[in-house]
Amino acid sequence: MKDKKAAMEMSVGTIVTIVLLMSVLVLGLVLIQKIFNSGTESVDSINNQVRSKLNNLFSEEDSSIVILLGSSKVAEVKADSSSFGVVFGARTIDGTSSSRERLQYRISLQNDSDCINKNSKSFVESWFNGLNNWQNFDGYDGDKSESILRFSIPKGTALCDQKVYIDVKDNKLNKDVGGAYFTIKVVRKGLF
C-alpha cells in the first residue's frame, strides 16, 4: 500500500513539474519574441512620440535630413515582410514654415548593391512605390516635414544589403535641401 501511495505522489509531482516547466518555456518564448520585435524600427504611423524623436535627431545631428534608424542607419527587414516603414524628416533651409508641397523627396537605389546583384534591379525596385519620383511629405510642423517610406520584401528574397538614397528639394527656394541614405539588410525570417 505504501508503494502505491508513493508512486501516486511521485506521478502527481512529475505532472506539476512538467506544467511549471512548460509555463516557464512559454513565458521565455514570449519574452524572446518581444525582444526581437522591439529591435526592428518599423513604424506604422507618425505620432507625437515619433515627432519628438525626429526633433531630437534634428538637434543632435545638425542636419537638414534625418532618418529614424539610429546611428547605424540600417533597417533589418525579414524576407516576407508585407509592410515595413522607415520614418525620415527634412527641414527648410531658411527656417521658415514648411508645407506639404514645399519640401519634396525622391527615393532612389544604389545600382551596384548586393541586393540588385543577387536578385535583379526590377525585382528590388518592386519593393517600393513611387521610386525615382518626387513626392510630397506626409505631414509638416513648423519648418519640418516628415514621411514614412513603406516597402515590402517578398518571400524568397535572397539575404542581401540595399542602399537607399533620399534626396530632398525645396520648391519655394528652388534649391536642393540635401541627401541622406540608409541600408536595408534583408535577414532570414525567424521563428517569430
Image (tube, rainbow, N blue to C red):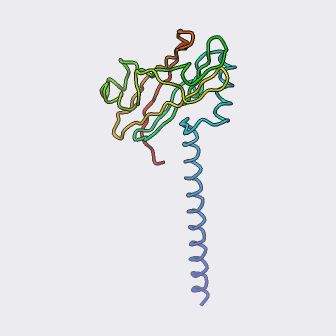
Res 129 quadrant in image: top left
In percent of width and height, residue 85 lies at: 51, 34
Task: Give the side of residue 95 with respect to residue 43, left or right.
Answer: right
Residue at horizontal 58%, vertical 85%?
3
Q: Which residue is drawn at 62% across and 20% down?
A: 98
Residue 153, x across and y down, in percent: 40, 36
Q: Is residue 19 above or below residue 187?
A: below
Observer-nearest of 44 and 169:
169
Instruction: Please determine whether, in this image, residue 185 is positioned above or below residue 25.
Output: above
For the N terminus, give its image quadrant.
bottom right
Quarter of the view holding residue 89: top right
Residue at the location (58% across, 41% down)?
38
Percent x, y of residue 73? 54, 24
Which residue appears at 50% of the width and 23% of the height?
Answer: 182
In front here: 142 or 30? 142
Residue 135 x/y as whole percent: 47, 24
Q: How many labels does the image show?
A: 0
Frontmost residue, 64 versus 10: 64
